[in-house]
Amino acid sequence: MTTELDRWVKKQRIAVFHWTFERIGGGEILASYLGKALNCKVYCIGKSKLGFEDVTPYLPKYFRIFTRIMRKAEYLRNFEYLLWSSLDLEQIGDFDIIVTSGATPRAIVTPDYTMHVNYCHSPPRFLYDLWNFRRRVAKSSWRRFAINILGEWMRIWDYAVDVRVDYYFVNSEIIKHRLKKYLKRDSVVLYPPIEWEKYRVDESEDYVLFVSRLVKEKRVEEAIEACIRAGQRIVVAGTGILEDEIKRKYGNHSLVDIRGFVDEKEKIELLSRCRALIFPAVAEDFGITPLEALASGKPVIVDNTGFPPILLNKTGFVEQNGVFKICKGGIITRGNVANLTTAVKLVDRYNWDSEYLRNFAKQFDFEYFKVNLILHLKIWKEKFNKFKEGG
């Protein structure tokens, strides 16, 4: 079956389009895996501030930049719809299939013979599920009024862009629900992959690990405070808008080790030797890091919203301990400092089966991702061709 799919995909002219590489996160890594699985180029409209040399472990050689814009104006991101819709796709290549990654590349207008598949990380959150939160944080009634007008306009634009997509992949059941609720579109869940074999289980050292972008919704400060209160050393790896603030506040604390950006080799080393991963992000769409921790045989402490608790539930139930749900893969709780502190202390009370966790994570390996990706593209392309031919 795999050989048949490989032969089929080699016959197709395919390209992947991702919104930018302004920073490296789960979406950018996923885009690179799409390119690797389909053996095609990945196009984007920006590049990492770190430079390609620093992010080589994440970015395969087939990345190509075709334009760069708005490097420091992320708040204008959705105006990229106009940039993508003005793109002359046929000047880049004559494609049978394009796979767009993220919200804004959906605006590409394709020839009628080109099938357009979108990998949806989430419908634009500030327009939909986080809309009321965004309005509440506005500092004036005039700003709230302007946000209302802009939001309605952007939702109309988003609906207009949505009809250009023929089929959708989504990264989790959470996003499948959002896509159906807000845009009334069906989709297929295709979990982001890991390269399972590169992770390993080593003897745990005395630190809890936090790996993520340093932004408010990831709750990095809550994770740090919880470990300090629990008397537990924490290693913080990642960059983001809170990096300078975190360094000023905790840089000299004896229990806090702030590493900043770490390359793939160091990340794997940190995962293999931590006592646990703490990942209290709010309503995370997927969250690749908890999966990487499980592949390293380590338990994970997660917030009870978003996909990470769904992931831990899949590992198997152990017991309910007040507001703490103990699974074979870790602890689910509320992401406030008090509960996270208790969860950090609870880690030592359970015998985590490292080999079980590692074997559980194998189902998310890249090879399974590749087969499912190509299989659905093949099925959809056959339907697309029949529709195009009036069948």
Image (cartoon, grey):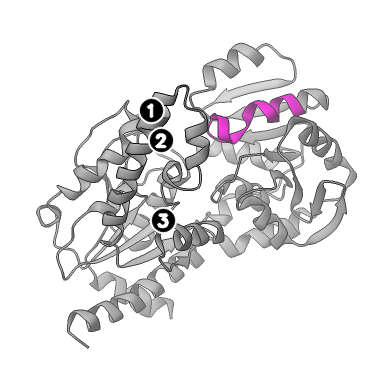
Residue kind at label 3, given as amino acid type: Cys
- Residue 160 relative to residue 29: left or right: left
Segment colored magenta: 212-226
- For this orientation, the residue located farthest to the bottom is 391
Task: Give the class, few, some or many, for how many residues have Cα within 10 Å of label 1's Cα (few <14, many ≥20).
Answer: few
Say which element carries label 1: loop
* Residue on which disc 2 sits: 55
Task: Give the class, few, some or many, for how many residues have Cα within 10 Å of label 3's Cα (few <14, many ≥20).
Answer: many
Q: Is residue 220 covered in magenta?
A: yes
Q: Looking at the picture, tell me which residue is in the foreground, 306 or 153.
A: 153
The disc at residue 184 is: none
Q: CA distance from mark 2 to mark 3?
A: 23 Å
- Residue 8 relative to residue 353: left or right: left
Q: Name the spot of residue 346 as percent of width and height, x first.
A: 86, 41
Q: CA distance from mark 1 to mark 2?
A: 7 Å
Disc 1 vs disc 2: Cβ atoms closer than 8 Å? yes
> In which quadrant will I find the C terminus?
bottom left
In the image, which is nearer the foreground, mark 2 or mark 3?
A: 3
Above or below, 43 relative to 259: below
- Residue 72 relative to residue 324: left or right: left
Residue kind at label 1, given as amino acid type: Leu
Q: Looking at the picture, tell me which residue is in the foreground, 231 or 179.
A: 179
